[in-house]
Every structure is written in structure tokens, then in C-alpha cells.
Amino acid sequence: MDRHSPERPGGFIVLGEWAGILPGCRGGGKGSICIRMSDRHKTKTSRHLAILCLTAWDKERQAIQPYIESLIHSSALAGSDRHLAVMMVQGVLRQLQYLDYIIAGHAKHPLKKMKPLTLMTLRVGVYQLLFLDRVPDSAAVNETVKVMVEERQPRWMVNFVNGVLRNIGRQKDTLPGPDQAGEKDGTVLNHPEWLVHRWQERYGHEKTGQICRRNNREPVLVLRVNTRRCDAERLTGIFRKEGIAVRAGSYAPAALIVESHTGTVSGLPGYDQGFFHIQDEAAQLVTMLLGPFAGGGRHLDACAGLGGKTCQLAQLLPEEAEITAVEPNAHRFQLLQDNLKRLGLERKVRSFQGGVGDLAAHGPGLFHGILVDAPCSGTGVMGRHPDIRWNRSLQDLLSYQQRQLEILRQTVPLLRPGGVLVYATCSMEPEENEQVLDAFVTENPDFLPTNAADFLPGPAAGLVNQAGYFSPTPAEGLDGFFAARLVQAVR
């Protein structure tokens, strides 16, 4: 994906999933935007900033995280209020169609004719009423209506929003839930129709419903234990001693799932000691496909991002192995260095700021294994980044495909004969996965696919399809991913 969204509600930084666009002003790149926090915005309430954030996003339909950074995290709100604001933003994006379904049933004014500010205010208010049990109905209504007043909206419009919210609040116990609402197939899936149709053709109606419903829930926090400093049993004991419920992952051996923490990741015990980093189980399993790791050798993470897979690779490989991590974006590159240092892995990894082509120009020699976790549409991680579902279009897939093929082609001269190439995306779309592999292997017939199941722990073998590709979906309880393991034949 674009790696543009590091933070889930509550401030959880997702290692390896951000484009590194600087908060406050982001210019010069594709789809770039610039938002500056004005003094008058710094003192707004969490509801006000959530509404402004969503209204700005709706106008541009770019990644939501830069708006969150510029309008919410740069504000004077206390930590708990920032958490509430982010939760409302992400929650509205997850339940967008359902919220509109409820509003349309209680508002005489058509949604398409409402001003963007009015509609977003209603969405934020209804989300609080129907999804935030700890927020009293009176606060959900009154504090949300105040935003309309502070935005100097006409009195009749303020009264309209107040009336709709109070009416929904009175009837909320009798309203259909997200799984019961809607006219098509009896459900509101909260995903764009073009994408739902594609998934239904590929996965069937039942599994598509499971994927969408999973995406509509707040994601769990998954950690990977830093096995060079700790182990899962010890870290579990540390968490439980602090009253934090955790459980082992279902597929990856070093995965822990945090069930009860609502604060920031940096507030978790063991964070400062580098005992873990955030990484979904699917991403953890992808890195294992570069194995076996019995010997040394030289390995390349060709799209390192913030370094989630780089850090895992540094833990899996023996001491004598060499690792190079490539990252072109300056901000992401600095965060990569910070993460390696916190985990005590900075001496294990050689970091290179630039692209794969730039690295090749420096004559780095040949690698035994190369991981290409390519930029993609991110359709597999819409649960963590709900804005993706509304930002993407069918045309985007072919654009990503060209970029993915370009990166793969740049790795060919860097892999030694007999070496392993792992291609991965957090997309579930054939244009970015199977079609990319087909085109690449056609151009490079000496790259031979191997069965991913042979290199994964037992429980994860069921996530490999008949073609031998790793292809889990959110229906299995983890991020949607794709990975193929190729071996270059010895000439």
C-alpha cells in the first residue's frame, strides 16, 4: 500500500505502513495536500476537529492520516480527547454507508443536497449515539450541535441537525444494526460497490460479507516479540502483571495479540526496552518465506518503509548474515533508523536511502534473498485504514501494477543464481498479485515459483492457495495479503 497511515485509533503506530508525509505541510508529490493548523483550530473540541478533519478529507479524498496529523495531533487536546477524535474519524469511515442509511431514514432533506459540513456533523453525531457506549447521548447530541453553532451555520440548520440527532437518539434501541440494515442482500457492507462486486465474484457472497464485516470492526493490536531481547512467554507475563490482557497469535510463532490496552503503543510495558514492534501476523508470515535461514548470506529488503519486515529479518537471520534495507523517503528512512535503534538492531542492518535502482547503481553485489513488499492499493488492510476503501478506484490497480513490475525488474540483476525472491503486497486484487507475477515470470522464465506452504509454520499452511501463493483475507482474522516465493534457477 502507500504506507500513509501509521496510526490506528488510540495512537497505535503500525510499523511499516506509512508514506512518511510530514504533518502540517505535504507538497510536491502525487496527490499532495497541504493543511496547516491555524490558531483558532488548536483550541477546538475533539468533535469539532473530527468533523473538520472528515470534511477536509471528503473534499480531496486523499489519505486521512495527514488530516489527522495536521488537525488533531497538532491541536492542544489532551491525549484522551485526541484519542476520541481519531476514534470518531476512523469510526465514521468504517461505518459510512450505515450511518448514511440511518440518517436518510430520519432526515427529510436528501443527503446529496446537504452541505458537506452538515452531513459530516450528522455522521459524527450518529456514530457516537450508535457506537460509543461510554459517551452519554446528551453529550453526543449537545456537543456535536455546538460545532454547527461555532461554525456560524444558520439557525434553521442548527435546529435541523439537533432534531435529527435527538430523533435518532430516542429510537436507537429499535434501529437495525449494520448487519441488518440496507436493501441489497439485507446488509450494508460499508465498502464501495465496485469492490464488493469484484470480491463477490471471486470469493462468493458469504466470504465477501465476512471480509467486509471484519473490516468494519476496530482492528486488534498485534505485536511481534523481539526475539533477540525477549520471548513471548516473558512478554506475556510482563503485560499481565500490568493488567493488560494478551494472547498468542493464531499463525505466527512470535505474535502476541493485545486485547485490553487503549493507550498508546509507547505506553506499553517493554516498549522502551525494545521488546516488540507492531506487525500483523500476515506480515510476519511473509518475511518467513525468505527462509530457510540456517546459513548466512546477504539479504535485501527492497521496500523497507519503517522497517517492520527488516526488523523481523534481522531477528531471524544468524549473526554472520548481512541485511540491507532500502527506503527512498527521507522521513520514513529516519523512522526506520529510530525503530532499528529502539530494537537494538541498528548494527545488524545496513540502511540505504534511495530506491532499488539507486542501490543497483552503487554496485552492492549479489544477494541470496530479496524481499519486495511493494507499494499497492492496500485493499487487504482496509480494516486498519478505512479511508482506503473510499479513496481507491478500479483504475488505480493498473497504475500500481506498473510500479510493482518496475521494482521487480530492478531486483533481477541483484539476485544471485539460486537465490530467493519474495514478492508481497497487502492487496487482494489479481491485477497487483497474480497478474504481476505472470508478467514477471514471462519476462524472466528462470524464476520458478515454489509452494509457500513449505516455508510457513503448520497453522499458516491453510492460508496458501492452490497455486502455492500466500493469500489470507480478513475473513481469517488477519490482514489481507499476497506473497509469492520465487527461486532463480542456477544457469
Image: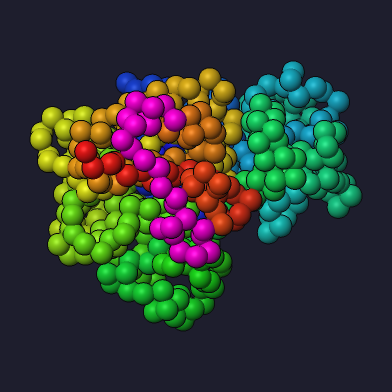
- Up the image or down, 298 lies above or below 58; here it is below
Residue placed at 12% from the left, 40% from the top? Answer: 364
Residue 204 quadrant? top right
Residue 236 falls left or right of residue 182: left
Between residues 339 and 35, which one lies in front from this camera angle? 339
Residue drawn at the location 85% of the way across and 33% of the way down: 183
Question: For the magenta stretch, what is the residue range?
Answer: 438-461
> Where is 280 relative to 430, above or below?
below
**Residue at the far front in the pictured view:** 491
Relative to 33, 203 lies left or right: right
Where is residue 147? Give x, y as percent.
63, 36
Which quarter of the figure is the N terminus placed in? top left
Q: Position of residue 214 (x, y in %)?
A: 65, 50
| Residue at 45 percent of width and 50 percent of height | 451
Q: Is residue 186 above or below residue 460?
A: above
Answer whether residue 45 is visible to the viewer in this image.
Answer: no
Q: Nearer the viewer, residue 385 or 102?
A: 385
* Residue 457 forms part of the magenta stretch: yes
Describe the colour scheme in one phrase: rainbow
Find out whether residue 71 is within the magenta segment: no
Q: Is residue 394 left or right of residue 321?
A: right
> Residue 294: in sight, yes or no?
yes
User: Residue 5: x and y, percent?
Assistant: 44, 41
Asked whether, in this view, residue 135 is left or right of residue 333, the answer is: right
| Residue at image coords 68%, 53% | 132
